[in-house]
Image (spheres, rainbow, N blue to C red):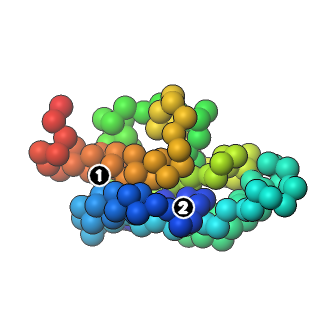
Amino acid sequence: MKLIVIAVGTRMPAWVETAWEDYAKRMPADCAIELKEIKPEPRTTGKTPQQMMQAEAKRIEAAIPASALRIALDEHGKDLTTMNLSSRLEQWRSGGQDVVFLIGGPDGLDSELKKSCSGMIRLSSLTLPHPMVRIVLAEQLYRAWAILVNHPYHRA
């Protein structure tokens, strides 16, 4: 199984790339995590937020493997505890299907794209900057895996 994070946004600051790589390299091969960056729609074209999200959704769709399970990250998504996420990760691993996590741009994800997802989760009730979402998600996926294998990273 592979975990794929598809995130709108490119050219992240070095600290974001460093943090992402740190967690990505910790994941074992049978639960690898991969990042696919999607070019954001320019915010200076006069398009409405809906038009921009639709254009980004087309790019996101093109990056999603056909058989992958889709999970959208959204402020209206389900709150999960780390233990709940670990249980979900265990279910996903036993299913053997790749899981794709979708992170939208400044305006979020297109509503039709969200409807195509198997689930929606949120990482926090706080508004997080999009670069930070990648890092928090990667860390939580690593922590969820650590719980499954009784790795000492997670101290309950």
In depth, the one of 52 and 63 nearer the eye is 52
User: Measured along the vertical axis of the image, is residue 38 above or below residue 53?
Assistant: below
The quarter of the rendered structure image containing the C terminus is top left
Q: Which residue is mark 2?
A: 6
The quarter of the rendered structure image containing the N terminus is bottom left
Per the image, label 2 sits on a secondary structure element best described as strand
The numbered mark at residue 127 is none
In depth, the one of 121 and 130 nearer the eye is 130
User: Measured along the vertical axis of the image, is residue 100 above or below residue 72?
Assistant: below
**In this rendering, position of residue 55 left or right of residue 155:** right
Q: Which residue is mark 1?
A: 142
**In this rendering, position of residue 106 left or right of residue 139:** right
**Residue found at the far top of this picture:** 125
| Circle 1 crowding by C-alpha within 10 Å: few under 14, some 14–19, many from 20 | many
What is the three-letter code of the residue carrying label 2? Answer: Ile
Query: Percent position (x, y) of residue 72?
Result: 57, 48
**Residue positioned 32% across, 42% down in the render:** 86
In depth, the one of 48 and 156 nearer the eye is 48
User: Measured along the vertical axis of the image, is residue 80 above or below residue 107?
Assistant: above
Whichever of callouts 2 and 1 sits on the residue coming sooner in the sequence is: 2
Q: CA distance from mark 2 to mark 1?
A: 17 Å
In depth, the one of 126 and 113 nearer the eye is 126
Query: Percent position (x, y) of residue 152?
Result: 12, 45
What is the three-letter code of the residue carrying label 1? Answer: Tyr
| Circle 2 crowding by C-alpha within 10 Å: few under 14, some 14–19, many from 20 | many
**Residue positioned 86% across, 55% down in the render:** 47
